[in-house]
Image (cartoon, grey):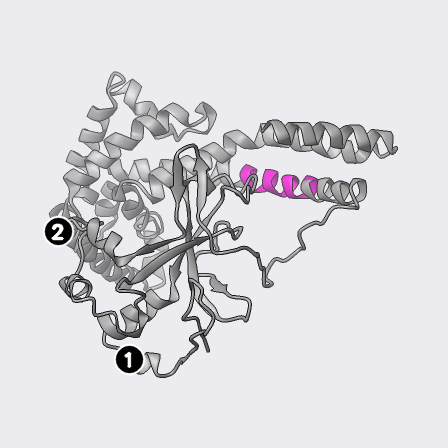
Amino acid sequence: MERKRAYEAAYREKARAMGKPELAEALESLKNIYGDYIPFAVARDLFVEFVYNGPEVLRFADAFKEVVEQREALARDGKLTAAVIELRKAADGHFASHDAEVDKRIFKALLPLYRKHVPSHLAPSVLEEINTKFKGNADAWVDHLYARSAFTDAARLRKALAKPSAGALKKLAADPAYRASRSFFASFLDQVRPAHAQLSDRIEAAMRTYVKGMMELYPEKTYWPDANSTLRLSYGKVEGSSPRDGVTYIHHTTLDGVIEKHVPGDVEFDLPQRLIDLNRAKDFGRYGVNGTMPVCFTSSLHTTGGNSGSPVLNGRGELIGLNFDRSWESTMSDIQFDPDKCRNICVDTRYILFLIDKYAGASHLVSEMNLVKSDAPRFIDLPIHR
């Protein structure tokens, strides 16, 4: 951050010295816009995390808004019955894998975080009930919502949809989960999203001026291209790193390390028995190296969000791996890339081929590929290209 601040100070000073105050003002404009933008960005992120990625009940209830709020229009157009049938199917699928108690615990865990961080003027009005009706007890409010809502109980919802009369749908409109859902969506759609979009546009406009200023004030430097929707490349080496004192990472991992992490029955670290058996027998086919099976390697390529799945090519344009992650020390590379520390993580082409051929038995897919084995000794010695 200190380097960024020093750069911005030098940028302002040089812009004014060259008689281009408008370039210096671009930074001030960005600072002011971001001041207005942050509350809406926070509210947007909280909405996404809480409503879209949090408890299912809010998203589920939102799916009923058309039938609940436009019943008369749907009935007049002869579409009500079909819409209700679709909702019944959706409800059956939802409740087949839904655990209301788990969902309620998620709601209770996330709600305090949401309430703590959401700007008060952007909070959904339904949360006022916690203070007015439940004496500030948020857990009691959540318990009431799950106990009374038709959207948390399959039998209650089926009953409400069995005969979707005006009265039945009026009850759904007053349902605590439905009211909460509509309040969350209304605050986001009416207050947060429009302002967030408008301020984002202003930030982009100011950034264009700022980038133009960098190119004018420092023409000797090399700048990134405007590569949206076009191919982007970064260059580096297959190499490990020593990010801090006493810590050194070599440049590759093997299947032995995967086996070491094996935890039977664990959602993240369980392994199929066939993979364990292949490793025990050292049955790697032509893809193993000296009795081991390469799995991943690190390199000094500059990657960012969205690069997962990108091909990693050698100097001859042959596919040697697929990028999918960054090391922990590399998470700062979107802000500042340090070639001595930042490493992306790639799955080795040989491991991909091993899984396709030896593990999955899909050798017919490998037969469609042109495998190239280099005579020169190097770590990546079995690249692939189509």
**Label 2 crowd bin: few (<14), some (14–19), many (20+), radius 10 Å:** few
- Specify the principal SS of the magenta part: helix
Residue 242 seen? yes
Percent x, y of residue 362: 27, 77
Which residue appears at 38% of the width and 28% of the height? 125
Q: Which residue is mark 2?
A: 264
Going by the picture, which residue comes out furthest to the top? 135
Percent x, y of residue 148: 17, 35
Q: What kind of element bears circle 2? A: loop
Locate the N terminus by quadrant. top right
Going by the picture, which residue comes out furthest to the right? 19
Which residue appears at 50% of the width and 65% of the height? 313
**Eyeballing the image, is 160 above or below 296?**
above
Residue 163 seen? no
Q: Which residue is mark 1?
A: 363
Please give the count of numbered marks on the rendered protein.
Answer: 2
**Eyeballing the image, is 350 above or below 267?**
below
Percent x, y of residue 60: 28, 48
Which residue appears at 38% of the width and 62% of the height? 348
Res. 259 mark: none
Percent x, y of residue 76: 35, 60
Q: Amino acid type of disc 1?
A: Ser
Which residue appears at 21% of the width and 33% of the height? 145
Q: Which residues are magenta?
A: 195-206
**Label 1 crowd bin: few (<14), some (14–19), many (20+), radius 10 Å:** some
**Eyeballing the image, is 383 above or below 223?**
below
Q: Is residue 229 magenta?
A: no
Q: Amino acid type of disc 2?
A: Pro
User: Residue 230 vs residue 124: left or right?
Assistant: right
Q: What kind of element bears circle 1? A: helix
User: Which of the two discs, 2 and 1, labels the residue nearer the N terminus?
Assistant: 2
